[in-house]
Amino acid sequence: MNPFEVFLTTPILNLLVALYKALNAIYLPGALGFAIILLTVIVRMILWPLTTSQLKSSQKMAALKPHLDRIKAEHGHDKVRHQQEVNKLYKEHGVNPLAGCLPLLLQIPVFIALYNVLLKIVQVNGDFLAGINQRLYSPFLYLESVPDVSFFGFNLSSKPNEWQQIGILLLAIPIITGLLQFIQSKMLSPAKPPVKVQPEKKEGKGELEDSMAAMQSQMILIMPVMIAFFSYGFPVGLSLYWNTFTIIGIIQQYKISGPGGLNKYLPRQWQKQS
């Protein structure tokens, strides 16, 4: 067994099964679905400090953008001086550009492991029980029967692309998934500041900035569409995990950095001043 299985996939699988058995013991309907939600919340809470560090680092970098633009305008022709001034700025404000990347890189293996576990648990096949039980730490956790995969009228192993055989209601899953992803993407984009009269830009620089702004706006739409498309072909159980993860991410983003580009669409009492 490889280290990835030993240190990530197998512990997450054991935790999920333990949560499922605890909820099933109290005869909670949809125990597997609620176990997936609880597992997602636990993983999200463990990763909360890393994500907080990433969000705060991004917030600091965004605040420094006007200073970085000024340094580029003044010293862009001299690469050495430009880098020296940028490093000096980072040091003065206590900013580490890599601080926002490291937490994200550390989260990726956890995401992959969680995805693999959920894929195994919701896609029941012929040797399901043997395949799951041999990965469990204790006989106390062994599953005696295949888990009930129903959850609020949905089958966690069904895929929305099977809606013609199962029901059109399944199409609500990728729509909700895409909508939640759009909300989070919009929040991650900075709120537009009040319009100010800017000095005339050089043609080349102005075109580049306009292209970058257009690309950022397009990604806010493209990413949710991509996630919704993946959700259309994935089991409902995986979308349940992803949507729970996204909702907690939205809450965390709001608490730390505010609603970002979503600010102007919120009721006045929920808006935050930048």
Image (cartoon, rainbow, N blue to C red):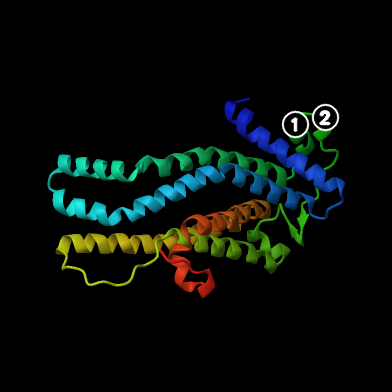
Name the amino acid, label 1. Answer: Leu
Residue 174: image location, x then y, percent? 59, 62
User: Whole-Å distance between the Cαs marked 1 and 2?
Assistant: 7 Å
**Residues marked 1 and 2 touching at CB (< 8 Å):** yes
Quadrant of the drawing holding the C terminus: bottom left
Q: Residue at x 81, y 43 (%)?
A: 22
Label 2 sits on residue:
139
Quadrant of the drawing holding the N terminus: top right
Circle 1 — which element?
loop
Within 10 Å of disc 2 (Cα), the crowding (few <14, some 14-19, many 20+) is few
Tell whether 94 sits left or right of 150.
left
Q: Residue at x 58, y 30 (%)?
A: 4
Label 1 sits on residue:
136
Q: Residue at x 29, y 72 (%)?
A: 195
Circle 2 — which element?
helix
Residue 107: image location, x then y, percent? 52, 41
Residue 135: image location, x then y, percent? 72, 31
Within 10 Å of disc 1 (Cα), the crowding (few <14, some 14-19, many 20+) is some
Seen from this angle, which residue lies furthest left?
A: 77
Residue 37: image location, x then y, percent? 69, 51
In this rendering, does residue 47 appear at all? yes
Q: Residue 57 got which mark?
A: none
In this rendering, does residue 126 appear at all? no
